[in-house]
Image (cartoon, helix red, strand yellow):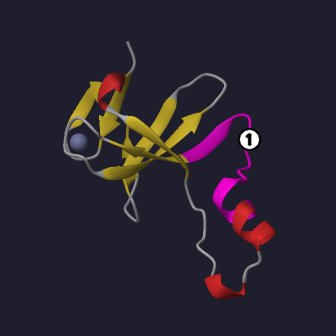
Amino acid sequence: MLLIQCPWCGRRDESEFSYGGEADIARPEDPDALDDTQWADYLFMRSNRKGHNREIWNHQHGCRRWFVAERDTVSYEIQATFPMGGQEQDS
Ligand SMILES: [Zn+2]
């Protein structure tokens, strides 16, 4: 059983959470200036790096808040979780 540290609720079972995707995706400054290919890149193309990643997670069956998790995609270990725009907390 994997436990994930919610920044507000503490450690909870992974079944309470949902994955929201890669963190730190910058929204285009001028969305009207993008063509379809650029929109597709923004919406669907992700780096899919092996190893350390920053991801967005939601405590769906708890406080329902979004937060950032730093996770290793090889070992599945979550090194830290923290509120979006906040500071790191130990996991
Ligand atoms: Zn929570």
Q: In which quadrant will I find the N terminus?
A: top left
Q: Is residue 64 visible?
A: yes
Relative image position of residue 11 (x, y in whole percent): 26, 30
Characterize the local packing of mark 1: few (<14), some (14-19) or many (20 or more) Cα atoms within 10 angstroms. Answer: few
Relative image position of residue 82 (x, y in whole percent): 37, 51
Relative image position of residue 14 (x, y in whole percent): 36, 25
Relative image position of residue 10 (x, y in whole percent): 23, 36
Q: Nearer the viewer, residue 62 or 54?
A: 62
Q: Is residue 28 left or right of residue 3?
A: right
Q: In which quadrant will I find the C terminus?
A: top left
- Examine the image and state in which quarter residue 29 appears: bottom right
Q: Is residue 2 left or right of residue 41?
A: left
Q: Is residue 38 above or below residue 60?
A: below
Q: Is residue 30 visible?
A: no
The count of marks equals 1
Q: Nearer the viewer, residue 37 or 78?
A: 37
Q: Nearer the viewer, residue 29 or 51?
A: 29
Element under label 1?
loop
Most extreme residue toward the front is 36
Residue at image location 38% in from the left, 51% down from the top: 67
Residue at image location 24% in from the left, 46% down from the top: 64
Give, as a three-letter code, the residue at label 1: Arg
Residue at image location 60% in from the left, 32% down from the top: 72
User: Is residue 53 located in the magenta-colored stretch of the structure?
Assistant: yes
Ligand 1 appears in which quadrant?
top left
User: Is residue 80 located in the magenta-colored stretch of the structure?
Assistant: no
Tell me the magenta residue range.
Answer: 41-54
Residue beneath disc 1: 49
